[in-house]
Amino acid sequence: MLAFASCGSKPATEAGSTSAPAKGKTAVPPPGAIPVEKRALVKFADGTLDEYTISDYDPSDVTLIGQNRYSASGGLMDQVEFTYQEEKQVLTVKMTKDEENRLKSRIVYQYNEKNQLAKETVVNKAGKAVSSNEYAYNNGGNVASRAILNGNNVKLAETVYTYNGTLVVASETKDGQGKPISSSQNEYDRDGNLVSQVLRNAAGNVSRRITTVWQNGKEIENTQISGDGKVQLKITNEYGNTGELLKKTVENYQGNSVQVMEFEYEFRTDRGRT
């Protein structure tokens, strides 16, 4: 069953087509159905289409295997392919190609013996590593730190996370020489949802505040405020009957712009994770 969370102006087509998605209506999914995102549309404030992405899955509609991004006129802009290690069911390679199927970049994912993500490396079209992130974990299996390295494996920065149980309550980022870059403090509601985040610069001054409003376990509003109290960005989310994200509105007060993202779904029975 196809449920449309958004509308375009051209006939709908299958993945790989060069036409924009069609106008549709939100369907009522069957009991226990799981939403699978098929199309994502990016629109301007006046509702005109900017670009859209079509997602492709395996025959069971569980595993994402590719995404094609198109311009409003239907021209292919780029395409992404995902490769998995079947036995452990983990993502190993994310490959991005241009409209002529030429390689643009790859992200290679490596895992430790506990099947936790240990390293992700960005590789350019020439096969050279450009940058990478390395992850370390605490005894509870949570990410304890993330190090950013350049193509020569030199550490540029590292973020260390502080937890209360499984919740990140603070973080601190330092450069490769150990000098402070930034830090953050987080607050949660009784359900464990992140409701407040305060970011500070190297001098310890507040650079940004982020507040989040939740409803029935779903994030419905996210507001980013500068250190001097000015609203910079507001993100509003709308959801469907099964909790699927239907619409995301991004109001950029600095750039004086509004971007709307709308999502279309098909529904499947529970056969595993997407």
Image: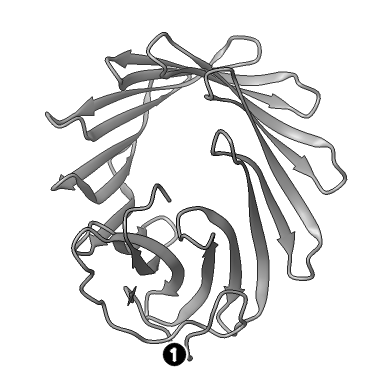
Q: Position of residue 215 (x, y in %)?
A: 14, 49
Q: Which residue is mark 1?
A: 9
Q: Identify whether 14 is placed above or below 203.
A: below
Give the quadrant of residue 266: bottom left
Write the residue at 52% across / 65% down: 55
Q: Type of residue at label 1?
A: Ser
Q: Is residue 254 left or right of residue 148?
A: left
Q: Residue furthest right?
A: 126
Write the residue at 47% across / 82% down: 21
Q: Position of residue 147 (x, y in %)?
A: 59, 20
Give the quadrant of residue 86: top right
Q: How is the image coloured?
A: one colour
Give the quadrant of residue 129: top right
Q: Identify whether 74 is placed above or below 87.
A: below
Write the residue at 57% across / 85% down: 19
Q: Nearer the viewer, residue 74 or 173?
A: 74
Quadrant the N terminus occupies: bottom left
Q: Is residue 69 left or right of residue 35?
A: right
Q: Position of residue 18 (x, y in %)?
A: 62, 82
Q: Identify whether 111 is placed above or below 4.
A: above
Write the residue at 84% across / 37% down: 128
Tag 1, which secondary structure? loop
Q: Nearer the viewer, residue 152 or 184?
A: 152
Q: Position of residue 121 (x, y in %)?
A: 69, 33
